[in-house]
Image (spheres, rainbow, N blue to C red):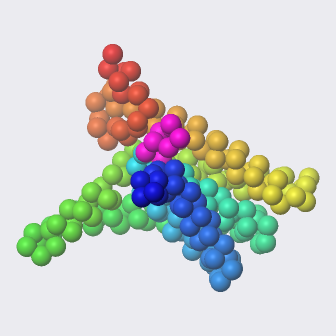
Amino acid sequence: MTNLLQSNECLLFLQILISFGGVILSFKFWGQTGLFAWAAFITVFANLEVNSFCNMFGLTVSLGNVAFVSLALAQDILSENYGRDAAKKSVYIGFFSAIAVVIISWFSMHFNCLDGLDGGNHKAFCQVFGAVGAIVLASLTSYFCSNHMNVWLYAFIRKYTKRIWLRTQFSTWISQLFDSFFFTGLCMLCVMLSHVTGIGWFNTQFPIGLNIFLEL
Protein backbone atom coordinates (compact mmCIF):
# COMPACT_ATOMS: atom_id res chain seq x y z
CA MET A 1 0.00 0.00 0.00
CA THR A 2 2.83 2.38 0.88
CA ASN A 3 4.56 1.68 -2.43
CA LEU A 4 1.31 2.40 -4.27
CA LEU A 5 0.86 5.76 -2.56
CA GLN A 6 4.46 6.67 -3.38
CA SER A 7 4.17 5.68 -7.04
CA ASN A 8 4.50 8.37 -9.68
CA GLU A 9 0.98 7.71 -10.96
CA CYS A 10 -0.60 8.15 -7.52
CA LEU A 11 1.44 11.27 -6.82
CA LEU A 12 0.34 12.65 -10.20
CA PHE A 13 -3.31 12.17 -9.25
CA LEU A 14 -2.78 13.92 -5.92
CA GLN A 15 -0.89 16.74 -7.64
CA ILE A 16 -3.81 17.26 -10.02
CA LEU A 17 -6.27 17.49 -7.13
CA ILE A 18 -4.09 19.94 -5.19
CA SER A 19 -3.27 22.11 -8.23
CA PHE A 20 -6.85 22.35 -9.48
CA GLY A 21 -8.07 22.81 -5.92
CA GLY A 22 -5.63 25.69 -5.54
CA VAL A 23 -7.13 27.41 -8.59
CA ILE A 24 -10.67 27.00 -7.28
CA LEU A 25 -9.80 28.23 -3.78
CA SER A 26 -7.90 31.22 -5.18
CA PHE A 27 -10.96 32.20 -7.19
CA LYS A 28 -13.40 31.54 -4.34
CA PHE A 29 -11.57 33.63 -1.73
CA TRP A 30 -9.96 36.39 -3.81
CA GLY A 31 -11.66 36.38 -7.21
CA GLN A 32 -9.72 37.94 -10.05
CA THR A 33 -6.84 38.98 -7.76
CA GLY A 34 -6.51 35.42 -6.52
CA LEU A 35 -6.24 34.04 -10.05
CA PHE A 36 -3.61 36.65 -10.94
CA ALA A 37 -1.64 35.62 -7.85
CA TRP A 38 -1.98 31.94 -8.84
CA ALA A 39 -0.73 32.75 -12.36
CA ALA A 40 2.36 34.47 -10.94
CA PHE A 41 3.13 31.66 -8.48
CA ILE A 42 2.43 28.65 -10.67
CA THR A 43 4.37 30.02 -13.67
CA VAL A 44 7.50 30.41 -11.55
CA PHE A 45 7.01 27.00 -9.94
CA ALA A 46 6.30 25.24 -13.24
CA ASN A 47 9.44 26.65 -14.85
CA LEU A 48 11.51 25.29 -11.95
CA GLU A 49 9.69 21.96 -12.03
CA VAL A 50 10.09 21.60 -15.80
CA ASN A 51 13.74 20.61 -15.24
CA SER A 52 12.61 17.35 -13.56
CA PHE A 53 11.50 14.33 -15.57
CA CYS A 54 10.04 11.01 -14.51
CA ASN A 55 8.37 7.91 -15.94
CA MET A 56 4.59 7.73 -15.70
CA PHE A 57 2.40 5.22 -17.51
CA GLY A 58 5.44 4.16 -19.53
CA LEU A 59 6.18 7.69 -20.77
CA THR A 60 8.91 10.19 -19.87
CA VAL A 61 7.19 13.40 -18.85
CA SER A 62 8.08 16.73 -17.27
CA LEU A 63 6.77 17.46 -13.79
CA GLY A 64 5.72 20.93 -14.93
CA ASN A 65 2.80 19.64 -17.02
CA VAL A 66 0.18 19.66 -14.25
CA ALA A 67 1.17 23.14 -13.12
CA PHE A 68 0.81 24.51 -16.65
CA VAL A 69 -2.60 22.86 -17.07
CA SER A 70 -3.80 24.44 -13.80
CA LEU A 71 -2.68 27.78 -15.21
CA ALA A 72 -4.80 27.14 -18.30
CA LEU A 73 -7.78 26.48 -16.01
CA ALA A 74 -7.18 29.78 -14.22
CA GLN A 75 -7.08 31.58 -17.57
CA ASP A 76 -10.34 29.96 -18.67
CA ILE A 77 -12.04 31.11 -15.46
CA LEU A 78 -10.71 34.63 -16.03
CA SER A 79 -11.97 34.59 -19.63
CA GLU A 80 -15.38 33.36 -18.57
CA ASN A 81 -15.91 35.82 -15.72
CA TYR A 82 -13.79 38.88 -16.54
CA GLY A 83 -13.16 38.72 -20.28
CA ARG A 84 -10.31 38.00 -22.67
CA ASP A 85 -8.23 41.01 -21.59
CA ALA A 86 -8.09 39.75 -18.00
CA ALA A 87 -6.92 36.33 -19.18
CA LYS A 88 -4.21 37.92 -21.35
CA LYS A 89 -3.14 40.00 -18.37
CA SER A 90 -2.55 36.80 -16.38
CA VAL A 91 -0.23 35.58 -19.16
CA TYR A 92 1.85 38.75 -18.90
CA ILE A 93 1.88 38.60 -15.09
CA GLY A 94 3.13 35.01 -15.12
CA PHE A 95 5.75 35.71 -17.76
CA PHE A 96 7.01 38.79 -15.91
CA SER A 97 7.19 36.85 -12.63
CA ALA A 98 9.24 34.04 -14.19
CA ILE A 99 11.66 36.45 -15.87
CA ALA A 100 12.05 38.42 -12.62
CA VAL A 101 12.88 35.25 -10.67
CA VAL A 102 15.46 34.18 -13.28
CA ILE A 103 17.21 37.58 -13.21
CA ILE A 104 17.12 38.09 -9.44
CA SER A 105 18.22 34.50 -8.70
CA TRP A 106 21.14 34.91 -11.13
CA PHE A 107 22.46 37.84 -9.11
CA SER A 108 21.82 36.01 -5.83
CA MET A 109 23.87 33.01 -6.97
CA HIS A 110 26.94 35.17 -7.51
CA PHE A 111 27.19 36.48 -3.95
CA ASN A 112 30.16 35.21 -1.93
CA CYS A 113 28.45 33.71 1.09
CA LEU A 114 30.19 32.69 4.31
CA ASP A 115 30.80 28.94 4.34
CA GLY A 116 30.70 28.75 8.12
CA LEU A 117 27.20 30.20 8.38
CA ASP A 118 25.03 29.49 5.36
CA GLY A 119 27.42 28.19 2.74
CA GLY A 120 25.53 24.91 2.53
CA ASN A 121 22.23 26.68 2.12
CA HIS A 122 23.63 28.88 -0.62
CA LYS A 123 24.94 25.84 -2.51
CA ALA A 124 21.48 24.28 -2.32
CA PHE A 125 19.97 27.55 -3.55
CA CYS A 126 22.34 27.55 -6.53
CA GLN A 127 21.45 23.96 -7.36
CA VAL A 128 17.75 24.83 -7.50
CA PHE A 129 17.97 28.12 -9.37
CA GLY A 130 21.16 27.42 -11.30
CA ALA A 131 19.49 25.14 -13.82
CA VAL A 132 17.99 28.04 -15.75
CA GLY A 133 19.78 27.49 -19.03
CA ALA A 134 18.26 26.75 -22.39
CA ILE A 135 15.50 24.51 -21.06
CA VAL A 136 13.98 27.34 -19.00
CA LEU A 137 14.25 29.72 -21.95
CA ALA A 138 12.48 27.12 -24.10
CA SER A 139 9.85 26.64 -21.40
CA LEU A 140 9.17 30.39 -21.07
CA THR A 141 8.91 30.81 -24.84
CA SER A 142 6.57 27.85 -25.09
CA TYR A 143 4.55 29.14 -22.13
CA PHE A 144 4.06 32.58 -23.67
CA CYS A 145 2.93 31.21 -27.04
CA SER A 146 0.72 28.35 -25.81
CA ASN A 147 -1.07 30.43 -23.17
CA HIS A 148 -1.83 33.17 -25.66
CA MET A 149 -3.27 30.42 -27.85
CA ASN A 150 -5.36 29.10 -24.94
CA VAL A 151 -6.85 32.54 -24.26
CA TRP A 152 -7.59 33.13 -27.95
CA LEU A 153 -9.13 29.67 -28.46
CA TYR A 154 -11.39 30.01 -25.43
CA ALA A 155 -12.68 33.39 -26.62
CA PHE A 156 -13.14 32.07 -30.17
CA ILE A 157 -15.04 28.91 -29.14
CA ARG A 158 -17.20 30.91 -26.75
CA LYS A 159 -18.80 32.63 -29.75
CA TYR A 160 -20.15 29.31 -31.02
CA THR A 161 -21.14 27.33 -27.91
CA LYS A 162 -22.52 27.96 -24.45
CA ARG A 163 -21.08 24.70 -23.11
CA ILE A 164 -18.36 25.75 -20.66
CA TRP A 165 -16.95 22.22 -20.40
CA LEU A 166 -16.54 21.94 -24.18
CA ARG A 167 -14.69 25.22 -24.69
CA THR A 168 -12.55 24.69 -21.59
CA GLN A 169 -11.49 21.22 -22.62
CA PHE A 170 -10.96 22.08 -26.28
CA SER A 171 -8.89 25.22 -25.66
CA THR A 172 -6.79 23.53 -22.96
CA TRP A 173 -6.11 20.33 -24.88
CA ILE A 174 -5.19 22.10 -28.12
CA SER A 175 -2.95 24.69 -26.43
CA GLN A 176 -1.22 22.06 -24.27
CA LEU A 177 -0.68 19.83 -27.31
CA PHE A 178 0.91 22.79 -29.07
CA ASP A 179 2.97 23.51 -25.95
CA SER A 180 4.30 19.94 -25.83
CA PHE A 181 5.35 19.88 -29.49
CA PHE A 182 6.73 23.42 -29.43
CA PHE A 183 8.67 22.85 -26.20
CA THR A 184 10.04 19.53 -27.45
CA GLY A 185 11.09 21.12 -30.73
CA LEU A 186 12.93 23.94 -28.94
CA CYS A 187 14.70 21.48 -26.66
CA MET A 188 15.75 19.35 -29.64
CA LEU A 189 17.06 22.49 -31.34
CA CYS A 190 19.06 23.37 -28.22
CA VAL A 191 20.54 19.86 -28.06
CA MET A 192 21.61 20.06 -31.71
CA LEU A 193 23.10 23.53 -31.16
CA SER A 194 25.02 22.16 -28.19
CA HIS A 195 26.60 19.44 -30.35
CA VAL A 196 27.27 21.74 -33.30
CA THR A 197 28.65 24.76 -31.41
CA GLY A 198 30.11 22.98 -28.38
CA ILE A 199 28.43 25.54 -26.10
CA GLY A 200 27.27 23.74 -22.97
CA TRP A 201 24.61 26.33 -22.15
CA PHE A 202 22.45 24.93 -24.97
CA ASN A 203 22.52 21.44 -23.47
CA THR A 204 19.07 20.86 -21.97
CA GLN A 205 19.74 17.27 -20.85
CA PHE A 206 16.38 16.52 -22.46
CA PRO A 207 15.72 12.76 -21.99
CA ILE A 208 14.56 11.92 -25.49
CA GLY A 209 17.57 10.03 -26.72
CA LEU A 210 18.62 12.77 -29.11
CA ASN A 211 22.03 13.17 -27.47
CA ILE A 212 22.77 9.49 -28.09
CA PHE A 213 21.53 9.76 -31.67
CA LEU A 214 23.79 12.72 -32.44
CA GLU A 215 26.83 10.94 -30.99
CA LEU A 216 26.47 7.91 -33.27
**Residue sticking out furthest to the left:** 116
**24, 121: nearer the viewer:** 24
Residue 120, percent across and down?
16, 66
**Residue sticking out furthest to the front:** 1
Q: Is residue 23 visible?
A: yes
* Residue drawn where x is 90% and y is 60% of the image: 162
* Residue drawn where x is 36% and y is 47% of the image: 133
Q: Is residue 189 magenta?
A: no
**Residue sticking out furthest to the top:** 216
Would you place residue 119 above or below residue 158 in this image?
below
For residue 84, side relative to residue 159 (left or right)? left
* Residue drawn where x is 11% and y is 72% of the image: 114
Would you place residue 215 above or below residue 153 in this image?
above
The N terminus lies in quadrant: bottom left
Q: Which residues are magenta?
A: 54-64
**58, 86: nearer the viewer:** 58
Residue 201, percent across and down?
32, 41
**189, 213: nearer the viewer:** 213
Would you place residue 185 above or below residue 42 in this image?
above
- Tell me which secondary structure the magenta stretch mostly adopts: strand
Residue 30, percent across and down?
65, 82
Residue 99, percent across and down?
45, 61
* Residue drawn where x is 75% and y is 52% of the image: 169
The C terminus lies in quadrant: top left
